[in-house]
Amino acid sequence: SLLTCKLLVRELCFGAYRVCAAGINLVCPPAIVLAYHRVAQHKEDPLQLTVTPKNFTEQLEIIAETFDDVVRFDAAQLHTARPAVCQTFDDGYADNYAIALPILERFKMPATFFVSTGHVEHGWPYWWEALSICGRLADHGRILAMPSSEQHKAVYALLKECAPAVEALEECHP
């Protein structure tokens, strides 16, 4: 039947793709990118952005035992002859420098830090922190689902209801 034929063709195509992908990974193994935000000891972490120093240390121990290549996040470094791991830190939280960096140095592992300079330079809270301060953290998922062009407007609209957070974000609203 036509349906059986379509299923057979589909299985053959996906089977061939899986074989090719496996072959490509043998020639040019993928680099696994581990994206971190915070390394700290927090009582509350509603967005689960934080890994404890103990867990981070344990993760680095496993990486050290498992991977020969721990590389920086750049195009040349990510193309390795063997499977590799790359660690990144987003946002520029102070604990990246104070807690994560000394642990990374102890293991002699590189990492790439992406720092949001406006937040660091001006002390602006991140929008998800401002929502938390306002008691509007439940709106986080809805905002993340929006196109990025609409996210700032939605966050600012919510924060207008919370005067202290709006004052802190006065210079960075759309």
Image (cartoon, rainbow, N blue to C red):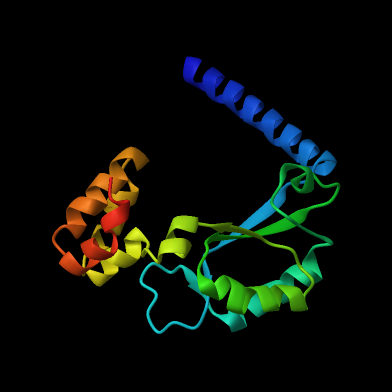
Examine the rendering and report whether any part of residue 128 can be seen. Answer: yes
Image x and y of residue 26, in percent: 82, 43
**Depth check, front residue: 20 or 100:** 100
Report the residue at 79% width, 53% height from top: 83
Q: How many numbered markers are drawn?
A: 0
**Depth check, front residue: 25 or 95:** 95
Give residue 100's quadrant in the image.
Answer: bottom right
Q: In which quarter of the image is the C terminus?
A: top left
144 shown above or below 164: above
Image x and y of residue 52, in percent: 54, 80
Give residue 122's quadrant in the image.
Answer: bottom left
Report the residue at 37% width, 63% height from top: 124
119 shown above or below 146: below
**Depth check, front residue: 14 or 113:** 113
Report the residue at 33% width, 59% height from top: 127
Give residue 58's quadrant in the image.
Answer: bottom right
Residue extending farthest top: 2
Report the residue at 59% width, 81% height from top: 53
159 shown above or below 154: below
Image x and y of residue 9, in percent: 60, 21
67 shown above or below 73: below
Residue extending farthest left: 161
Examine the rendering and report whether any part of residue 58 can be seen. Answer: no
Image x and y of residue 116, in percent: 49, 56
| Left or right of residue 89, residue 109 in this image | right
| Left or right of residue 92, residue 32 in this image | right
